[in-house]
Amino acid sequence: MLKIGKLTDYGVVVLDQLARAGSVKLSTENLVDSTGLPLPTVRKVMKALADSGLVIAQRGSKGGYRLALAPSQIRILDVVQAFEGPVALTECSVDNHQCDITAHCSLSSSWGGINTLMMRVLARVTLEDIRKPEMQDRLYRDLIDQSDRIQLINL
């Protein structure tokens, strides 16, 4: 099964809570209460989000966290990369990387295009899109409408 890790999922949940708060800073404790996540998990998530520049952290008695960008500017690709690192569906989909069977594999050159397609989809979907089901329906329809025109090898 191909899936994102739990911390990535939790990162999106926390970003949603920060988006709901708008310009109001939320403390770690606020985020624990509003998400139901354990304190150590929220701390890990906030560190990754702050390190990636997706949230702004302020220390002190008036401190807390807030989004660094509008929800419409936070790409899901950036969230995934903040937790998972570069998107690579297979070993050979990474630039100039070869696995043990590359010399005998007729498919290794195709994975790069598929990986690029996945990255384009993740880059097109934003935090704002995930927060609005009607946007998800539109994005899905747009992708299906374009599917006949996608040529993976030429990406």
Image (cartoon, helix red, strand yellow):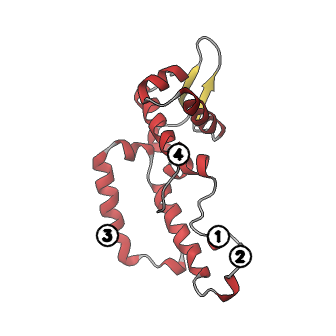
User: How far apart, in angstroms, are the residues tagged by discs 2 and 4?
Assistant: 27 Å
Q: Secondary structure at mark 2?
A: loop
In front of the other: label 3 or label 2? 2
Is 17 or 138 nearer to us in this picture? Answer: 17
Are the residues flagged by discs 2 and 1 in contact, CB closer than 8 Å?
Answer: yes
Q: Nearer the viewer, mark 1 or mark 3?
A: 1
31 w.r.t. 1: above or below? above
Which residue is denoted by mark 1 in the rendering? 91
Crowding at label 4, few (<14), some or many (≥20) Cα neighbours within 10 Å? Answer: many
The residue tagged 3 is 145
Disc 3 residue type?
Asp
Residue placed under numbered mark 2 in the picture: 98
Residue type pointed to by label 1: Glu
Q: Residue at x 68, y 82 (%)?
A: 102
Q: Point out the tag, 3 or 2, that comes first from the N-terminus.
A: 2
Q: Could you say where residue 124 lies in the image, as x and y percent from the top left?
A: 46, 56
| Label 1 CA crowd tier, 10 Å (few <14, some 14–19, many 20+) | some
